């Protein structure tokens, strides 16, 4: 399935931090920043999560929730959240089905080795569940500011 800007974002149910089941469609009426990242407790992923944490209040004032997705188990997400005081939900996609649905589960290379993993990506979903923007192969520096600016300039009436 190909993701298309302007089409309904694929719905899913994943285990969230704290053990709750989270369904994307539960957030209808709010915007959702759905970001996929490779692994809890790694340098770039921690930096990205902390930048989302620091901008959380700004996103909230724009009726936007943040959901992070990786293949880490929910128990590891709970530790990540506690260590860095993250005010948003992290979702566990251990079998990478949702990552595949969003096209972020891809062949990667590191130090000459090839492996499958999540390519850092962010999707913005509007209040009706429509995909309005995607950022693929994200570089952390400046990304959170870009996402926030997009919402402020393109989504606010």
Image: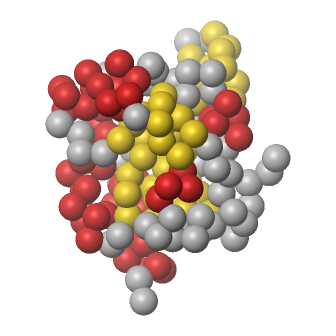
- Name above or below for residue 146 compared with residue 16: below
Quarter placement of the C terminus: bottom left
Residue occupying the point 46% across, 21% down: 72
Give how far across and how far down residue 17 sits, in percent: 36, 31
Is 88 above or below relative to 69?
Answer: below
Along the line of sight, the residue nearer the viewer: 118 or 70: 70
The answer to whether residue 49 is left or right of residue 22 is left
The coloring applied to the image is: secondary structure
**Res. 38 visible in picture:** no
Residue occupying image coordinates x 31% and y 40%: 49
Farthest bottom residue in view:
157
Residue situated in front as seen by the camera: 56 or 121: 56
Is 41 located above or below residue 142 in the figure?
above
Res 85 seen here: yes
Side of 60 relative to 109 (left or right):
left
Q: Position of residue 85 (x, y in %)?
A: 17, 36
| Residue 61 place in picture, x, y as percent | 26, 71
Residue located 46% across and 79% down the image? 155
Q: Position of residue 127 (x, y in %)?
A: 51, 70
Closer to us: 11 or 96? 11
Q: Which image quadrant for residue 132?
A: bottom right
Query: Can you tell which quarter of the image residue 68 is in?
Result: top left
Residue visible at 53% across and 35% down? 14
Image mark count: 0
């Amino acid at each position: 399935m190909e993701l298309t800007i302007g089409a309904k974002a694929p719905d899913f149910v994943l285990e969230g931090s704290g053990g709750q089941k989270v369904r994307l469609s539960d957030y209808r009426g709010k915007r959702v920043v759905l970001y996929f990242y490779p692994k809890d407790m790694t340098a770039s992923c921690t930096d990205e999560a902390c930048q989302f944490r620091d901008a959380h209040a700004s996103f909230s004032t724009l009726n936007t929730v943040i959901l992070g997705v990786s293949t880490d188990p929910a128990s590891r997400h709970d530790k990540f959240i506690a260590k860095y005081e993250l005010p948003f939900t992290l979702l566990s996609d251990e079998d990478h089905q949702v990552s595949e649905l969003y096209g972020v589960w891809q062949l990667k290379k590191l130090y000459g080795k090839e492996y499958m993993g999540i390519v850092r990506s962010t999707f913005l979903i509007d209040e009706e569940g429509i995909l309005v923007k995607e950022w693929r192969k994200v570089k952390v520096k400046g990304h959170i500011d870009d996402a926030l600016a997009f919402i402020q300039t393109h989504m606010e009436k």
